[in-house]
């Protein structure tokens, strides 16, 4: 039985006669484990949708098996596949466990942190995804989950974020993408400066000219269709 809350939390109830975990292990994982991430994109997209929709019915150990596979599929050529992979990771990172803590912890993600951040930013350079809001939201959620674990990567992350900000400011057309971009920058600043207040000046130097350029140009935001909408999932 499907609960209306699935729009935000995935499927929250299912038929007890269906072993969703067994189906995932036997029929979904083999496709996602294929070394060729660009092979059979329809099957890959359907497999990612399955684990995203049924994430509440699959045990954590299987979610942890799926995470590195989703990270790999961030580099898939298919815009549908890498968008679903980003969206699934973002949804995983919002799941709650005991004491209202995130089910997937920063410690769980430490072995994958470098590849996660690298593949997310590389995905923004894939055709059709330069302003993919689901990828940027996954970046924002990754920062929020990882917290101080992202600090070693800030020197490479901030230039990419500021370059993207400068690019979209010239013709802002994706409000959700822009929102998640600003949130990602804010998280970078807050996390890093909280750990080392001396880095404030470095952020000021990196961001001042970009913000000055945006204010000087006073560009009005234009809205254009994204071409795909997964927000209700």
Image: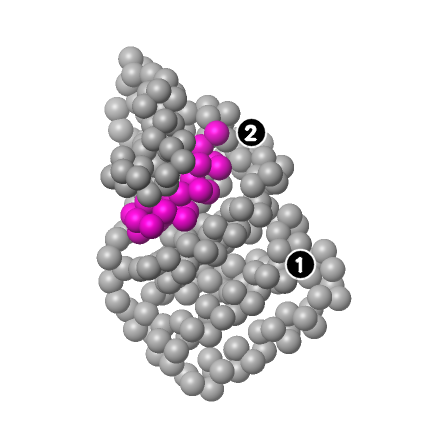
Check disc 1: other Cα within 10 Å, few if <14, some if 14-19, many if 20+: many
Which tag, 1 or 2, sits closer to the chain's start?
A: 2
Residue 232 marker? none
Q: For the N terminus, which image quadrant?
A: top left
**Residue 70 within the magenta-colored segment of the rendering:** yes
User: Are discs 1 and 2 less than 8 Å apart at CB?
Assistant: no
Q: Is residue 107 visible?
A: yes
Question: Is the residue marked by circle 2 packed among few (<14), some (14-19), or many (20+) residues within 10 Å?
Answer: few
Q: Which residue is drawn at 38% across and 22% down?
A: 25
Question: Which region shows up in magenta?
Answer: 65-86
Which of label 1 and label 2 is nearer to you? 1
Tell me the distance, in whole angstroms, between the alpha carbons under discs 1 and 2.
27 Å
Q: Which residue is at a point 29% across and 13% down the rendered structure image?
A: 17
- Please give the residue where the numbered disc 1 appears in the rendered image: 192
Comparing 197 with 210, the one in front is 210
In this rendered view, identify the residue nearer to me: 208 or 76: 76
Which residue, given by chain and number where applicable, does mark 2 sit on? 98
For residue 160, side relative to residue 222 (left or right): right
* Magenta-colored stretch includes residue 80: yes
Figure quadrant of residue 207: bottom right
Q: Is the magenta stretch mostly helix, strand or loop?
A: helix
Q: Where is residue 36 in the image (x, y as percent from the top left)?
A: 37, 39
Which quarter of the rendering shows the C terminus?
Answer: top left
Q: Residue at x 64, y 48 (%)?
A: 149
Q: Vertically, is 210 above or below 32? A: below
**Tag 1, which secondary structure?**
helix
Q: Quadrant of residue 42?
A: top left
At x 42% / y 73%, what residue is drawn?
167
User: Residue 44: percent from the left, percent from the top?
Assistant: 31, 37
Q: How many numbered markers are drawn?
A: 2
Q: Position of residue 221 (x, y in %)?
A: 34, 74
Residue 206 image point, x, y percent: 61, 73
């Amino acid at each position: 039985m499907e609960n209306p809350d699935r729009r935000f939390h995935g499927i929250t109830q299912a038929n007890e006669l269906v072993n969703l975990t067994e189906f995932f292990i036997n029929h979904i994982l083999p496709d996602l484990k294929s070394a060729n991430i660009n092979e059979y994109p329809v099957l890959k997209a359907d497999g990612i949708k399955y684990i995203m929709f049924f994430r509440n019915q699959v045990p954590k150990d299987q979610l942890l098996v799926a995470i590195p596979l989703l990270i790999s599929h961030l580099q898939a050529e298919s815009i549908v596949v890498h968008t679903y992979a980003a969206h699934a990771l973002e949804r995983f990172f919002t799941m709650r466990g005991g004491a209202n803590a995130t089910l997937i912890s920063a410690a769980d993600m430490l072995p994958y942190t470098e590849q996660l951040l690298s593949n997310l930013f590389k995905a923004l350079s894939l055709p059709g995804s330069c302003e993919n809001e689901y990828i940027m939201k996954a970046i924002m959620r990754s920062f929020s989950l990882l917290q101080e674990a992202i600090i070693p990567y800030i020197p490479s992350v901030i230039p990419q974020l500021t370059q993207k900000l400068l690019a979209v400011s010239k013709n802002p057309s994706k409000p959700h993408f822009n929102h998640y971009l600003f949130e990602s920058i804010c998280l970078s600043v807050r996390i890093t400066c909280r750990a080392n207040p001396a880095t404030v000046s470095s952020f000021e130097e990196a961001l001042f000219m970009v913000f000055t350029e945006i204010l000087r140009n006073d560009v009005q935001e234009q809205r254009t269709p994204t071409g795909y909408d997964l927000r209700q999932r």
